[in-house]
Amino acid sequence: MNTRRDFLQTSGVGFGWLAFQALAQAEADAPLAVKQPHFSATAKRVIFLCMRGAPSHVDTFDYKPKLTAADGKDGRAPGTKLHGSQWKFAPQGRSGLPMSELFPHLSKRADDLCLINSMHTELPAHAQSFLKLHTGNAQFVRPSLGAWALYGLGTVNENLPGFVTIAPPSLFGGSQNYGSAFLPAIYQGTRIGVDARPIAKAQVRNIAPPVGSMAQRKEIELVQALNREKLQRDQVNPEVEGAIESFELAFKMQSEMPKVMDLSKETKQTLAAYGIGEGNATDDFGRKCLLARRMVEAGVRFVEVTHSDWDHHFKISKDLPATCEAVDQPIAALLADLQSRGLLTDTLVVWSGEFGRTPHGQGADGRDHNSKGFTAWMAGGGVKGGMRYGSTDDLGYEAVEDKMHIHDLHATILHLLGLDHERLTYRYAGRDFRLTDVKGSVAKKIIS
Amino acid sequence: MKTIPWVLVSVLLTSVSAQDAGLKQKLEQGFTTFDLDHDSALSAAEFNTLGEYSPKLKGRPQVVDYLFHTLDANRDGKLSHEEYMNIAAISGGAKPSPEKPALIETPSTAEQIAFFEKKIRPVLADKCYKCHAENSEKIKGGFVLDTRDGMRRGGDSGPGVVPGDLVKSLVIESLHYTNKDMQMPPEKSGGKLPDSVIADFEQWVRMGAPDPREGKTSVVKAEWDTEKAKNHWAYQPVKKTAAPSVKDSAWPRNEIDRFILAGLEAKVIKPVGDAQPEALLRRVCFDLTGLQPTPEQVDYFLANHDSQAFEKIVDALLKSPRFGERWGRHWLDVARYAESTGKDVNCLLPHAWRYRDYVIESFNKDKPFNEFIREQIAGDLMQAKDSRDRGLKQIATGFLAIGSRSLNERSPKQYALDTADEQIDAMSQAVLGLTVACARCHDHKFDPIPQNDYYALAGIFLSTETLYGTAPNFQNLKASPLIELPTDCGLPRMPLMLTQERRAEVEKDLTKTERYGTMQFYATAAKGVLTGKGFNVNNDPQKLVMFVGINAKIGECKTELASYDSEGRQKLLAMGVRDYPSTPSSGPPTKPKSVEETFRMIAGRPAQFSSINDSPLFARGDVEKPGAKVPRGFVSVIASKAPAIPSRESGRRELADWLVSDTNPLTARVFANRVWHWLFGQGIVSTVDNFGTMGQPPSNPALLDHLALRLQNGGWSMKSIIKEIVMSHAYQLAATHDAKNFEADPENTLVWRMTPRRLDAECIRDAMLAVSGALNLEAPVGSAVAQIGDGAIGGYPIKSLRGPLSDEPFLAASSDFRSVYLPVPRNAVPDALTVFDFAEPSAVKGSREVTTVPSQALYLLNNDFVAKQAKRFADKLLPLPENQRAAAAFKLAFAREPTANEAKAAQRFFADYPRLDSDVLTSFCRALIGSAEFRSID
């Protein structure tokens, strides 16, 4: 059986038998227990704002005055023309970070943001790059970033899942993007909702009890009585011990999870700050962001929130502002909220799509896929605010300075969590696997 | 409008010679002219534009492409000035050909040898040999430079030196420090060499790399030592050993027991006592059929539980159709069976279920395992008794077609190689327990499987057409045909009909779309935007979407029409493989005449992979780096006699014969070990899919060989070997804990007891249906996926196309049929299965994990399906007198009476309720279903 115990026994660690047994027991009993990071961490938890569809970097966070100047000139692809951004950029905050007018709210938090203008990845194809962004590998089924983080650190609140993903797409790799692959199943992400439906009515699967809580408690007590009886008969049976514990955890989880998901106790001001309200363009993403804040506050290690509408091949002049509007205020509110609760210092917020878009136009009013250069940003969690890291060329085609590949992004995120991406390994099928495979380097310059 | 110097270009690409004094200047001029975005580099697009202006290159995009990639030494997708200037070195009048790079090899003169001895050898010895010589401690990158052979052959990255070719000689590239990943000598050995030394090396390569150093390199590029690795236990012939003598001669019931007991006695371990009859019956019923014993079976066995009665029960279980459903599912784990393509587009595979049914039937009919394997690899090439047999043999090859695939892969070449790779991976792990696919990019790191072996196998699969179906859609340009089974084969068909009205509607749609497509096609073609690469409508994305939409619509209509016969019944279709023709194919159209043909030109399988052919060895697995062709063949480390492959066939038939040949030691061992694993919860080799050096050694090698021989000599009967194991004393041991034994052998590898096991997801779900009385033992025709038909899960949100297909119905899939018949789409496997560690169907999985996590408890407490079964279970108890209900429930759920404590717990439970209505009983029943005992066997 490919159990953790099996792994421990075959991994060649030089412990004596007793040490191994103790370790195996600890592992088997509490795979989610808090583990020490490799070194002291600046971030304890992550909120990953995943912008599916590939946001146009030159219109949002990568200020390209020379592209504006070259507007109408020939683009790099045959027959295309360069399109300068239709939106104005202006310096914001004390840092003077250039921000697009598409993000009026987030502009006020410019000093929190570390813009990584030099992102790049291999393929300008959504599915492959989306998987790469999440698992570091588009070809094979590999554990997700969130699963690795949970495997490395455990979780502080076992009454909640340690890795939650809010409204992921069912396409583009689907559940692989939050799966645990060969890592034990407990590290996989718990899905809430799906991209195509509003989050307001979404629920975790099998979380709602079919009977009242008193009745269920009685039911669980009967289960546990039967389990204890079996354990006594068997003398030693870790499987049954695990089962007893899992029912207690499940019971706590199903009472805690709905509480975390219930936004009705939030103040009117908070709801308004996130832009939550029927008919608001910001309502859905506002709810998602507020959920994310409530989750990390309750001790969830890794929360991912997806917005799925960034693939602007045409009608970009109308659709991009709409998408930006949907996320701008909620994200700004999230940062402010985290800060006012003292959570921003050790919560890493990451914003990224799977790649960016071309500086030249596609048709009269659109931009095509571009994997050679795009922008992600980070805030909080020990990252320097108000800075631009790396850059693309003058037009925004490709990353040229301090290039940051997806593997580097992963290595950096793990580093901020106190994990050495080269030491965070799992032995499977006869070899040690890493999130970053054989690549990845930490962008030390962005760490404060 | 830019003025393009025509004359320059034609000069540039027709007659350049390195001696031409004006050449350099002309090259410079060309560079600045075509560097349209002035980034001091030529992108592929810019270089293509250059090609458009050259009479020699115009209309020959492959040549332009080849030139570009050859020049792009650091593979960053653009040509730096320096890279571009190398054009002089490689054109030289010789036509570039991707198949045969020109090599200039003339005998070296004494002067040239002197140059080598004076300028080159000392540098190599001083700077390189430490890490790159035969006797280096660890050879870096699998590359040695101390022999001519080694230097030319190169290492993991490609050839070190190609005489006369500066660009392809990686040694030169690394000396220049242009490629970040390959800079030599490294900093710690003194860093980059002086320019003058680099110039010497360049001159040396240009003069043909004269090199007097003799000696074949036998460099081991991987971490294995050939001879030592060949001695690995798994590659040795299966050995017949007489069953050992044992001290306690009364204990063994058959030969298996003597092997087991000898192992235990050697460690002074005494096996525990026999299992209680109830436990043994429950164990053997679940193990052989996946279902718990019925109350009648329990009564019978408790009344006469001697070994004869047990044998009778075993025989009956093996004869039951439920056996095939249980053991077939085991094989489906190994075969990574699923009903959608997974990965990016995740199209449904509505005909995959035929393979599932074939596997179940094979186990039920006790098809000899060697035949079972031969059919799955080459059933299409085998003789058939009649049309039903023909149909089944064709369906068997579905094994090679049901793997996951990336339908959105843009490069047709890459797609072809990935398909073959997936097949090699599945075949080698499933049958041989070897990870041959690890040798795609380099020799296997741990096992003696050279890259050559991989491409010998790849040739076989690249000569094979994989037919998996899928309807074209917005992201799927890779739909394939399916196999039409003989109409008189008598195999079941899905009761799906195409009504007259629907047919007329689809035909009308098709005609309309085709007409519209033709019009748009010619309008576009007339504007000259139809290029060798497809529609050049980049500047009009809506137009591209329109063409993709037309293509998808036409494909969708044609798929639908082609799926039904003239009477409107769904045709008998199956997934599988067949050989490509032996004559070279013309490949996809190059001058398309319709929208469909244009997309075939873009996405169709390349001609080089559309006929019977050997595969080139691709350096680093890179499709753009084909090397010499490798004759088709098998895994060389297995010294089994390899049949010759006829030039007009793929070689699958020979591969199939070789796999199951008596001299191949792996196939029988691997399967015997799988059987042991499925009966004991762990294999004699615990890494059931990996018998290589990174796998675990067998805990009892003699027993493994005994079982392998029994399999081979017993006509490869699967049922016989299962029965022999089940009839052993070892299998019938109790699951009792024993502190002393546990200390000596905690993992129970020597089998001093039966390891208690958690049931599989399917067994748990079937057991719920069984206790509720709702289990429908009939085998359904087809599956829920077949009912839905073609489509991609998640769909694509383009409104003109079919709406997105939700994964929800699959996740929540429920029926009263046995679980083996639930839908299995990749990334949308039903909750009921995934929650209890179903085998992830992306790859071969002979051993499932066993986890205990809160999501399982949540499922048992809150899921609708569980609630429904608990309610049905309760309804059966309701008519009984109140004081008999608990006992009856225990008998149904656990095949035993409640203990005193359990009876008390049940009383306590009921005592709190004033009235024992259906809800209370449902809650009670759910608790029994949720208990650990319900999902375990001792």
Image (cartoon, grey):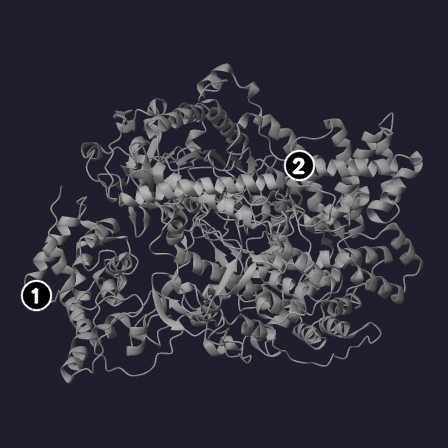
The count of marks equals 2
Asked if residue B273 shows in the view, the reply is no
Q: CA distance from mark 2 to mark 1?
A: 80 Å
Frontmost residue, B573 versus B467: B573
Q: On the rendered image, what quadrant is the N terminus of chain B found in?
A: top left
Q: Relative to residue B36, is residue B189 drawn left or right?
A: right
Asked if residue A258 shows in the view, the reply is yes
**Residue B372 figure quarter:** bottom right
Amino acid marked by disc 1: Asp
For label 1, the residue is B20
The residue sitting at 37% across, 50% down in the picture is: B598
Q: Position of residue B559 (x, y in %)?
A: 53, 48
For label 2, the residue is A250
Frontmost residue, B550 versus B634: B550
**Residue A61 figure quarter:** top left
Q: Residues within 10 Å of mark 2 (few under 14, many from 20)?
A: many
Q: Position of residue B652 (x, y in %)?
A: 53, 70
